[in-house]
Image: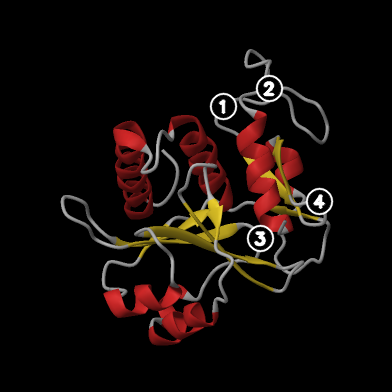
Amino acid sequence: MNPSFSVLRRLAAAGPPTDRAEPRCEMCAVPISEPHTHVVNIEGRQLMCVCRGCYLLFTEPGAGLRYRAVPDRYLAFPGTVVGPAEWDALEIPVGLAFFFRNSALGHTVAFYPGPAGATESELPLESLQAVLQQHPELDVLTDDVEALLIRMPERGSAGGCLLLPIDACYEFVGRMRLLWKGFDGGSEARQYVESFFTTMSGRARGGGRP
């Protein structure tokens, strides 16, 4: 299994922490509040909950460290329209997918909603490069810690492109795994997809987390 996707599966399967009364930094063990910051373990492909002090140790871009801070960056691209033909070329069977660059693998990984919470695209992603060449404003992801969310418009729902922190994508995967029912996910899962996209769009316009 692809190591990028396996970390998503592990996070989704882990469930909520057992001690919600006093979450602690996974580096120095001091109590941390909700919401809190995260870093990614580049080698182990793990998302870690950390205090602000530990987080700041790993914010220097290009430092080549084992850990990398997940930035609080949400961007919307209101003038960007990925056309149906471009989307069809990606061969993703649903109208929403996340894309992020894995520095350990050296390429971009795609995943989309499915019965397991998220399904990895096992297809070649050369077509994504064609999309990025056509829309260079989307080619701004920071490796390992940011993801590009592309959603195609459907009847009754809006489409668009968003840049999100990778922890927001982990949140989506874990929630979808709990909600998914049957072949198409069910009404609760579809409502969550709509709510998630609306919330993330609002954060992109507002400049970050509330």
Question: In the displayed structure, does residue 197 sit left or right of residue 16?
Answer: left
> Are the residues flagged by discs 4 and 3 in contact, CB closer than 8 Å?
no
First along the sequence among labels 4 and 3: 4
Return the residue nearer the eye: 172 or 137: 172
Q: Which residue in the structure is indicated by mark 2?
A: 23
Residue 58, image x, y percentages: 75, 53
Residue 2, image x, y percentages: 71, 59
Q: Which residue in the structure is indicated by mark 3?
A: 144
Q: State the CA–CA distance, disc 3 to disc 2.
A: 24 Å
> Are the residues flagged by discs 2 and 1 in contact, CB closer than 8 Å?
yes
Query: Residue 172, relative to residue 67: is it above or below?
Result: above
> Are the residues flagged by discs 2 and 4 in contact, CB closer than 8 Å?
no
First along the sequence among labels 3 and 1: 1
Q: Amino acid at mark 3?
A: Asp
Marks counted in the figure total: 4
> Are the residues flagged by discs 3 and 2 in contact, CB closer than 8 Å?
no
Q: State the CA–CA distance, disc 4 to disc 3.
A: 12 Å
First along the sequence among labels 2 and 1: 2
| Residue 9 image-quadrant placement | top right
Q: Which residue in the structure is indicated by mark 1?
A: 34
Query: Residue 112, relative to residue 109: is it above or below?
Result: above
| Element under disc 1 | loop
Q: Amino acid at mark 2?
A: Pro
Nearest to viewer (mark 2 / mark 4): 4
Q: Which residue in the structure is indicated by mark 4?
A: 44
Question: In the displayed structure, does residue 147 sit left or right of residue 191?
Answer: right
Nearest to viewer (mark 4 / mark 1): 4
Q: Amino acid at mark 1?
A: Glu
Residue 148, image x, y percentages: 47, 63
Return the residue nearer the eye: 143 or 6: 6
